[in-house]
Amino acid sequence: MIPFFDMHAVQSTLQQQISDAFERVSRSGHMILGPESTAFEEEFAHYCGARFCVGVGNGLDALALTLRAWGIGPGDEVLVPSHTFIATWLAVSMVGATPVPVEIDEHHVLDARCLAARITPRSAAVIPVHLYGQAAAMDEIRGIAGKAGLLVLEDAAQAHGAKYRQRRCGSLGDAAAFSFYPTKNLGAMGDGGAIVTDDAALADKLMALRNYGSKAKYVHEIPGTNSRLDELQAAILRTKLPYLDDWNDRRRAIAQHYTAGLKGLDGIETPLIAPHNDHVFHLYVVRAKEREKLISFLAHREIKTAIHYPLAPHMQRAFSELGIPANDLPLARRAAEELLSLPLWPQMRIDDVDRVVEALRDFARR
Ligand SMILES: *Cc1c(COP(=O)(O)O)cnc(C)c1O
């Protein structure tokens, strides 16, 4: 059987070092906001090429707390891609603002050419998502946002280590949100997230917001929340961070192997990479004409696949209040109907990649 993702393979390459990290935290006596989280924040900011990193409880909070720190709330609009994981939209509604969708381009990211037309006097920020591990067109987006006075928040939850014009995701906007959900390119052993920014005042405010609005114990400047990256997760992330580039290289090699093997296949479109992008293939996503049939065909060959994501955000009941007609945003709907993610994890063997390619070729020939 070829799983969609092999968590065990990822963990077992670092078994001893992970045990050491647990031991270190256990002996330290610090469980929350201690030396591991501070060290990880420094290391991850440095890795991203930014000045500050603030660890939080998860990626959704990283997005929502940044919007909150910027004072974005009821009456404000935030531009988001029409096709993304639901968290991007939820972060906006969590602070009481309204998500305004912008259609996607051929790389499945927010289409900068559609952005200007969606800006209104209420627009406060835009959240480009570096979906599947490939950066959005940040120069174009920043140019338009700058003219309209919008803040730019990168959703980099799928793009740890990805580069855009030689610069890492996380250093391309006013701030960036990361998730360390276990299956992400850099994953914890539970929930985790972070905001990365060059803005000292923003970092300062986020440090208070994540910790009950407090900088000094029992002194509460602002009504904050509890969303912190705990010491154990920080220690695990510190253990894994030195391997991230190597793991991303392997993801890229697997993706290249898929793309070469699937070239010219009828009914399958392989992912397009913009020339200025260093894609880190959080997911390897193809467009499949007969997706449902293909999924069962592969399942018969004991190959697991996944769909990211089967229903466009504007068609989710959670967002029915927005009143966006279902047949708006046809590109988002098409993405939900046609995209299929193939198995991929850094330790996946090329033999197994070949087996998946062979199965897809057999499907096309049948
Ligand atoms: C995973 C993810 C998030 C949310 O991260 P959590 O840690 O699960 O809250 C946000 N945006 C995108 C694009 C994601 O893939």
Image (cartoon, rainbow, N blue to C red):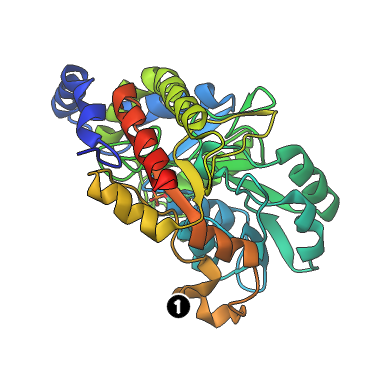
Q: Residue furthest front?
A: 366
What kind of element bears circle 1?
helix
Percent of width and height locating residue 125: 68, 56
Say left or right for 257 vs 7: right
Say whether residue 171 is left or right of residue 94.
Answer: right
Image point 83% across, 55% down: which residue? 148
Asked whether the viewer can see residue 296, the reply is: yes
Write down the residue under mark 1: 317
Amino acid carrying label 1: it is: Arg
Q: Position of residue 94 (x, y in %)?
A: 49, 66
For residue 152, side relative to residue 265 (left or right): right
Q: Is residue 50 above or below residue 131?
A: above
- Along the viewing direction, whichever of 166 and 71 lies nearer the viewer: 166
> Residue 64 at x, y = what percent?
51, 56
- For the residue pair 38 and 60, the one nearer the viewer reads as 60
Could you say where residue 159 lies in the image, as x and y percent from the top left? 51, 36
